[in-house]
Image (cartoon, rainbow, N blue to C red):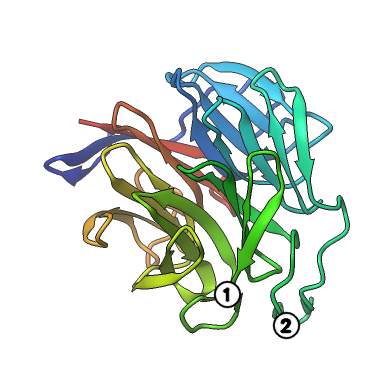
Amino acid sequence: MVSVGSRDFAYDVIPDWGALPDGFEWGLLGAVTVDADDRVYVFSRSDHPLMVFERDGTYVKTIGEGIFRDGHGMCFDPNGDLLVVDRGPHVVMKFTTDGEKVMELGQRDEPSDSGYDEETRAVARAAGPFNYPTDVACSAAGGFYVSDGDRNASVHKFADDGTLQFSWGKPGSGPGEFRDVHSVWEAKGRVYIADRENHRIQIFSPDGEFIDEWTGFAQPADIYVDDNDVMYVAELAGRVTLLTLDGTVIARFGSPDDRVREPGKFVGPHGIWADRHGDFYVAEVFAGKRVQKFVRK
């Protein structure tokens, strides 16, 4: 077995975690998350879009067949319901873990007017919800944030019932500006935004006020913070970074210079989540199309 890292952050790598049923395939994996019972939810752009597994990789069930088209981001709310981002149809939905849809936000198949140019992939202006939304995360004070996203330059804050409270952001590379708002997470009273194509994480107050930025990332695609205040960042260009909440790098795995489908290395990390045992999961797109599990020693 391949091992990576050192000291308190040493891990054994399970490079192809999860036993798929016959006829299933991983496809491009938009996100991964873990519930309170250690079950692992994998959001796949395939015929079996939201697959659920036990911690040991045993397949349990699939949610959302015939509903999800372009799975991209997800998280659990404090009630244990699942908030999911279906990017292509421009919607955010809430489901029970039994697969019942209880809320849908956005105008399905009608993107907001951000002036997105297909040829240059440039966003002309920030717009309302949604144009290719990317991720969702809950706020400690109630409600949730949506990063929006691949064809917009906005972060939206919603109340628990789905009422839009406010938005912030605009296209660009300055403070509070975005080039592909790709993930959002709130921790310790701060909101962390993966500003993917500016290769940085921007930090805001819960009211959207700019605080700071951390540079030196390689297309940060997904952010998760565990109960020990360790931040996990999946970087699309082939790397995973662990940090403290003051921005100090704890560990890095993989490299943008060595994007290969080998244990402990990556082609396209797109989703990341850690469980209460200190293990973490990385879901990949591009030719990766797998989940790697990093088991903490």
Task: Say which element carries label 2.
Answer: loop
Residue at 51% over, 16% down: 58
| Relative horizontal placement of residue 214, taking residue 184 as reference (left or right) | left
Badge 2 is on which residue?
124
Distance of label 1 from label 2 (alpha carbons):
11 Å
Q: Hey, what amino acid is under mark 1?
A: Arg
Residue 25 against residue 31 in the figure, above or below: above
Badge 1 is on which residue?
179
Task: Say which element carries label 1.
Answer: loop
Residue 223 seen in render:
no
Foreground of the two, 113 or 236: 113
Image coords of residue 213 (percent x, y): 37, 72
The local crowd at label 2, few if under 14, some if 14 to 19, many if 20 or more residues have their Cα within 10 Å, is some
Foreground of the two, 47 or 185: 185
Q: Quadrant of the C terminus?
A: top left
Q: Quadrant of the N terminus?
A: top left
Q: Hey, what amino acid is under mark 2?
A: Ala
Res. 26 image quadrant: top right
Res. 180 image quadrant: bottom right
Residue 85 against residue 18 in the figure, above or below: below
Image coords of residue 274 (percent x, y): 38, 36
Residue at 58% over, 75% down: 179
Residue at 38% over, 71% down: 211
